Amino acid sequence: ISLLRFKKPIEIRGAATLSSHIIIVLRFFYTMKTAFCFVTLVASAAAFAPASKQAISVATQAKQDFLEAEPYYDQSTIPVNTFKNKAPFTGKVVSTKRIVGPQATGETCHIIIDTEGDYAYWEGQSMGVIPPGVREKDGKPHAVRLYSIASSRYGDDMTGKTSSLCVRRATYWCPELKADDPAKKGICSNFLCDTKAGDEVVMTGPAGKVMLMPEEDPSTDYIMVATGTGIAPYRGFIRRLFFEDTPAAQAYKGEAWLFLGVANSDALLYDDEFQEAKSKFPDNFRLDYALSREQENKKGGKMYIQDKVEEYADEVFEKLNNGAHIYFCGLKGMMPGIQDMLKGVAAEKGLDYDEWLKGLKKAKQWHVEVY
């Protein structure tokens, strides 16, 4: 009898992992001319228990350090515009899933794209998508649409071979037709939300550096403000800091504070992931929602994103004065309300808002990506 113990998991057709000790019992029955060998594999039933939520695949068990710069916070080698309009990259859709409830205002989808590891990007960058077909007015190809990438550089399966998008289907309600007018729907958003596994997506980029995380100082606080699908880059931040085994996650000692504004609870995006991060890292991750159709601000009106941030104005200003970085992502209509609120708070504190903002921009603490 021989007993062999294996420390590393054994993968069975990608469906289950035998993580407990494996006992291989070899029984030999000898006859005069023939030897028969029977192998029995015995494993505890616990080995087949479902994986935890963040363990999307077996690949999540590996360490996420193979796409890092050296040192990991060095931003000098960030990929930018690797693929251009005339020489784009073609990926294939892995899955397209609606991620909002029935009472949400509109449809938002999470789309995972297989890039075979050939489309490198960093958290906070955007992907260009060229929808198929041509424009009706002149027969030319459609222009590139930019979407903030909604995954870390390692992708949702943490293999480094996929990227994800968070896309809201753009529709136009015609008051005369009393229905959506298909002639005025968003070309690219509808294409992406209608994709199925195996469909090709023509991509450019990655684009942008304005939304990157400065990781050199692991005690840096991040204040992330989003409306709707503006949540995309922050999902990448949060997965990198709290769900992956990255050098950044191991070193991080600061606080990441997320503010998300949507219409109602059904419209919340990635709430399960954020709640898990909050539960596991209560000292490093904070979460506040502004639900305009379910909550009221201090004046009795609808709770918009600027109202929620204003509730913590003193703390937000203090963090910024101590070097925190603040990010804004979402529809450009969010910024006037945000800036009016900040200007009012600055006045109450006896600060010159323009000079205060100028100082944040000079220190590269102010990050804005709106559309």
Image: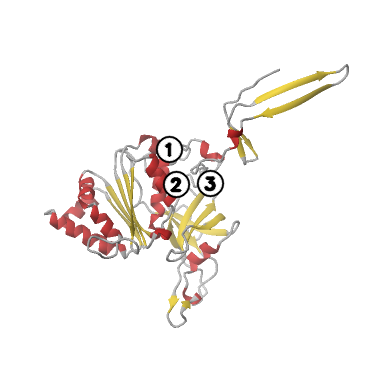
Q: Nearer the viewer, residue 242 or 323?
A: 242
Q: Secondary structure at mark 1?
A: loop
Distance of label 1 from label 2 (alpha carbons): 11 Å
Q: Tell me which numbered mark, 1 or 3, is placed earlier along the sequence.
A: 3
Q: Is residue 353 left or right of residue 288?
A: left
Q: Nearer the viewer, mark 1 or mark 3?
A: 1
Helix, strand or loop at label 2? It is loop
Crowding at dot 3, Cα within 10 Å, few <14 / some 14-19 / many 20+, comes out as: some
Q: Which mark is residue 371?
A: none
**Mark identifier at residue 161:** 3
Q: CA distance from mark 3 to mark 2?
A: 11 Å
Question: To which quarter of the image does residue 291 belong?
Answer: bottom left
SS category of the residue bearing label 3: loop
Q: Quadrant of the C terminus?
A: bottom left
Q: Which residue is mark 1?
A: 246
Q: Tag on residue 152? A: 2
Q: Amino acid at mark 2?
A: Ser
Mark 1 or mark 2: whose residue is earlier in sequence? 2
- Between the C-alphas of marks 1 and 3, the distance is 16 Å
Which residue corresponds to the image point at 43% horizontal and 63% vertical from the top-left? 104
* Quadrant of the rendering where the N terminus is positioned: top right
- 337 sits to left or right of 350: right
Q: What type is the residue that disc 1 sits on? A: Thr
